């Protein structure tokens, strides 16, 4: 009698399991000094089945307190812009390139980004394979210089690169754009930068087959800083 092969687990069950295991590993990670100052690790927000994965730099104070990415003012602005671009909320998944908050919201250091990169690339690989249909499009939106450089693995000028489709690891479409925190800073061309991010997100929405309010109305839309959350 020959030994039978164990029945294979379908991807619909295996991939959520792999993501939960990765999240558990991250929650115990002491791979860099940020583990000593974090309150909690910040892994992801949204469904891993989402078509679009928004990748930011690092958790801030609110994210560190809640354990979820993009829940402060920058997150509220990003949520509003995503909605206005026409990406349904269920089609957005959020994470950062480092999973622990750098003290004082400083930029993560090169060695911290490197220490966390295996977590990030594994998370993106599972997300990219998790989409409901293999033929459905998946798009990464890289938010800000640190995230763009970590994902494209080269130095970039965000102003020159944003709005142009790139490929992540030769496989997944990637749209580079500004980080929403940058859009919250007062500076002379802030409104223009907001419009540029809105344009970039509309390209993303169109790529995955959705149209936003602004497109339907055929008029440019200007974005206000959302109130309420800090
Ligand atoms: Fe580990 Fe990443 Fe947190 Fe550093 S930032 S402790 S590598 S999870």
Image (tube, rainbow, N blue to C red):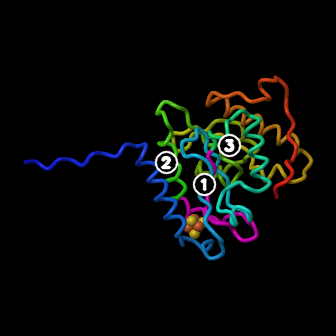
Q: Nearer the viewer, residue 53 or 115?
A: 53
Range of residues picked out in magenta: 93-117
> Which quadrant of the picture is home to ligand 1?
bottom right
The picture places residue 144, in percent across and down from the top left corner, at 71, 50
Label 3 vs label 1: CA separation?
A: 19 Å
Q: Which residue is tagged 1?
A: 44
Q: Residue at x 55, y 33 (%)?
A: 137
Per the image, label 2 sits on a secondary structure element best described as helix
Residue underneath mark 2: 125
- How many neighbours does mark 3 have within 10 angstroms: few (below 14), some (14-19), or many (20 or more)? many
Above or below for 66 versus 15:
below
Q: Position of residue 40 (x, y in %)?
A: 63, 68
* Disc nearer the start of the sequence (2/3): 2
Query: In the rendered view, does 146 fall on the left or right side of 228?
Result: left
Between disc 2 and disc 3, the foreground one is 2
Q: CB of mark 2 within 8 Å of CB of mark 3?
A: no
Marks 2 and 1: CB-CB under 8 Å? no
Q: Earlier in the sequence, mark 3 or mark 1?
A: 1
Please say whether residue 100 is one of the residues in the magenta stretch: yes
Q: Position of residue 100 (x, y in %)?
A: 63, 66
Quick one: which residue is furthest to the left in this view? 1
Q: How many marks?
A: 3
Which residue is label 3 attached to? 176
The reply to whether discs 3 and 1 touch (Cβ–Cβ < 8 Å) is no
Question: Can residue 111 be seen by looking at this rendering?
Answer: no
């Amino acid at each position: 009698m020959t030994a039978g092969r164990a029945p294979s687990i379908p991807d619909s069950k295996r991939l959520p399991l792999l993501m939960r295991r990765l999240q558990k590993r991250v929650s115990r990670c002491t791979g860099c000094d940020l583990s000593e100052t974090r309150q909690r690790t910040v892994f992801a927000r949204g469904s891993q089945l989402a078509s679009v994965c928004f990748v930011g730099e690092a958790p801030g104070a609110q994210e560190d307190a809640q354990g979820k990415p993009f829940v402060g003012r920058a997150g509220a602005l990003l949520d509003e812009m995503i909605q206005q671009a026409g990406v349904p909320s269920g089609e957005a998944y959020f994470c950062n390139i480092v999973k622990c908050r750098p003290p004082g919201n400083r930029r993560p250091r090169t060695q911290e980004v490197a220490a966390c990169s295996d977590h990030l690339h594994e998370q993106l690989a599972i997300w990219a394979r998790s989409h409901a249909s293999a033929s459905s499009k998946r798009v990464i939106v890289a938010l800000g210089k640190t995230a763009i450089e970590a994902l494209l693995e080269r130095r970039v000028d965000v102003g020159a690169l944003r709005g142009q489709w790139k490929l992540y690891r030769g496989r997944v479409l990637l749209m580079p754009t500004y980080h929403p925190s940058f859009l919250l800073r007062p500076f002379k061309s802030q409104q223009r930068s907001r419009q540029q991010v809105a344009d970039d997100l509309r390209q993303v929405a169109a790529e995955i087959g959705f149209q936003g309010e602004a497109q339907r109305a055929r008029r440019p839309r200007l974005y206000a800083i959302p109130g309420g959350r800090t």
